[in-house]
Amino acid sequence: MAAEDETGTGAGAGAGPSRGAALASTYRLQLRTPASDPDGRGFTLADAEELVPYLADLGVGAVYLSPVMTATPGSTHGYDVVDPTTVSAELGGIDALRSLRAACRAHELGLVVDIVPNHLGVDEPAANPWWWDALKRGPDSPHFSFFDFDTEEANGADGRIAIPVLGTPDDVADLVVVAPGDSPSGEAELHFYDHRFPVAPGTGDGTAREVHDRQHYRLVHWREPLLGYRRFFTVTGLAGLRQEDPEVFEATHAEVRRWCEEDLVDAIRVDHPDGLSDPVGYARRLRALAGDDRVLLVEKILAPGTESTPPEVLEPAMPVDGTTGYDALRFIDQLLVDASGEARLSELARRYTGDPGDEEQVHAQSAELKRQIVAEDLAPELARLARAVRREVAVGLDGPASDDVDEAALRETLISVVARTPYYRADYPVLRGTLPTILGGLRRDRPELVPALGLVAAALARGGEASTRLAQVTGAATAKAEEDRLFYRLARLVSLNEVGGSPGRMGMPVEAFHLAMAERARSTPLAMTALSTHDTKRGEDVRARISVLSQLPEEWADLVTRVFDEFPPPAEDAGYFLLQVIVGVWPELGGPTDDLRSRLHDYADKAVREAAVHTTWTDQDADFESGVHRWIDTLIDSGGGLLGPFVERIAPAGRDNSLVAKAVQLLGPGIPDVYQGTEVWEDSLVDPDNRRFVDYGPLRSGAVARAGHPKFMLVRELLRLRRAHPEALTGGAYVPLPVQGPAASDVVAFTRSVDGRPTVGMIARRRTAVLPAEEITGTVVLLPQGTWAVRPDGTPLSGRVDLGELLSESAVVVIVREGG
């Protein structure tokens, strides 16, 4: 099979309509157990099955499920799996998955399932049988080797598994031993308030402290830089798995193998492969398991690159079909931004936040935050990496070769390497040369680190544990520094502060966008294309409206001045960031509801704590946070006179942006995913806000369709077109249409073709807040030979078409070649 080819199949290699036939598009559903919902509703596999007729009528190609394995009780997302060998009974179990598959087949829909190979949930040890057994029996447990434990004496935890759970170092005194007859598990347990831990056989006698000291684990203060296992980023409730071990892979993928053997799934989405020891090797094993006829997609962030470093491409040696689409999201979002507003928005960002937000400053801040994250938040991982470096160099030598390098110099060198790495991890074969270049630059810029650099280079050259640990630390540091901190500080245009985004850039010329899409169509035709996901920081329609600010920077500047004069925020940097979000979700008619007020408060808490400028998750400034809440309430209660008219001004252009983005997503290359509920206008913010339940009643009843909702009508039309023209829209070429005239640079026009024959296309205009339709009269598009029809009304077109009339009623027009 292709997965056994040591050269790799290459991303998307061999991927054609046969592999992606059932995946004309996807529709993402967020499953929820009833226990996770205060109202006890949940959203189970049976609920998903009830939606199948609606999704089929909408034109969807495949149902795309969030993780279905048994997760931590009460989980609202499913990524904290505690038993990867079973489909969650609360979601309906394997029989419900089979039933959903049958319903999908009856309606000619495919099925995509999300899996989580990197980690398991350990917040509730008793809920995870493998973790419980490993803690209970230590190295004697058959599951001990499943987890990436760190029990070296040098780790400082007396050779035991350090678990950071205590509120203070003295809280060991609050431990309680619970006898077998009184414990939920029927065996002796050690309790710390609501936290339950197992007791090793024969160690349950004596005081709680004595019992604790006999265990294979050690409970430590959560602020202490001790950790006995690799985790997901800085989330101690998610413990890393050793997927590089064939036994672990087989155990954690037994259920996935059953899905493939029973043909229950058409595609598999892999969560966070960058966290694994060997992403390429893992992808090859998964391809061997899944076979060549299933689509494999990886949640891989491809770094956008800088002027001095090329943009990252998906590793060709990985036999997968593409990413989950954040790279495409970045291109589409940039297409909506008016580059002419850059200077003024940079000036405003500098005034209110002290940072203009240009690319140079963004990368400088990213590097500095990576340094901080590695030194503080990832201190246990850094210490483990440093030990691996010394151990690698000492292998095969008579004595230690690193005595001349002190620990401070070694750690500073490792921190500096991570800070300078422009990718999430630099050990993919396609990125070879990145680390040597970084080490060379440090040797030139930091001569005092030369001895430590030699030590690090020698360890990395072996390609062993040190190399792997460095890659894993780099990925975690990049994600935390950029997605979870920097993107809550940058405020030049917050619609660009998105996962996988490039906020230091303002706008993308149409010709550059066309080239990027054409390359995408050729290289990864089955990669996913996303606009909203369960992880996006703002929903697609919110971002689309905020991006209008780039068209009207002076009007925006005036609004900010008036708002801040009349309603001063507790801090201008936080206020400037939040005001963009508030404008992005403010209702066009009427003021915010109580529900939106509550959601904005929740969002503000997360935003200011993630930014970690005035308050943090671990050291909360209650006075500052209260001031933010009062400011939001004041704007909602008294600021409508300022905000309302401005929102009325930008909302139509925001809707235009949304429609253009949706049309590009659904007609462009790749497998487009419609995130739940985004077939209509939506105002979601960051999780968990974007994982709220969707009211499908008006959608399923046809009320939305009968009302002629513009986004719904566009989405339905384009999804149905994708199913009707799979050859052109799944694997077909992307061909820009020639546009001539004064507004040519603001027209996006392309077709999708098969064997050189254009079949389906779209024509759209940008910057509608400042460029009305009448001003593009005289700008023409040159259609390919033949007669084309506007969908859905059937208006015929051919030859040279003046866009002043064609785009007078809508910013987007979809065209189909008559006769196919």
Image (spheres, rainbow, N blue to C red):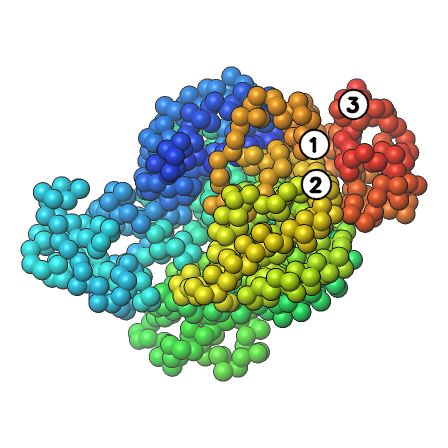
Foreground pick, 819 / 318:
819
Q: Are marks 3 and 2 in contact (CB under 8 Å)?
A: no
From the viewer's perspective, is 272 left or right of 328?
left
From the viewer's perspective, is 444 left or right of 404?
right
Residue at 56 percent across and 67 percent down: it is: 571
Foreground pick, 186 / 272:
186
Query: In which quadrant of the rendered view does residue 533 lie?
Result: top right
Q: Are marks 1 and 2 in contact (CB under 8 Å)?
A: yes
Tag 3 residue: 793
Query: In which quadrant of the rendered view does residue 359 lie?
Result: bottom right
Q: Is residue 74 something one can see in this rendering?
A: yes
Among numbered discs 1 and 2, the one appearing first in the sequence: 2
Tag 2 residue: 655
SS at mark 2 in the image: helix
Mark 1 closeness class: few <14, some 14–19, many ≥20 residues within 10 Å: some
Q: CA distance from mark 3 to mark 2?
A: 21 Å
Residue 238 at x, y = what percent?
Answer: 36, 51
Residue at 90 percent across and 36 percent down: it is: 802
Q: Is residue 429 something one can see in this rendering?
A: no
Q: Which disc number belongs to residue 710?
A: 1
Query: Marks 3 and 2: which is nearer the front?
Result: 2
Q: CA distance from mark 3 to mark 1?
A: 14 Å
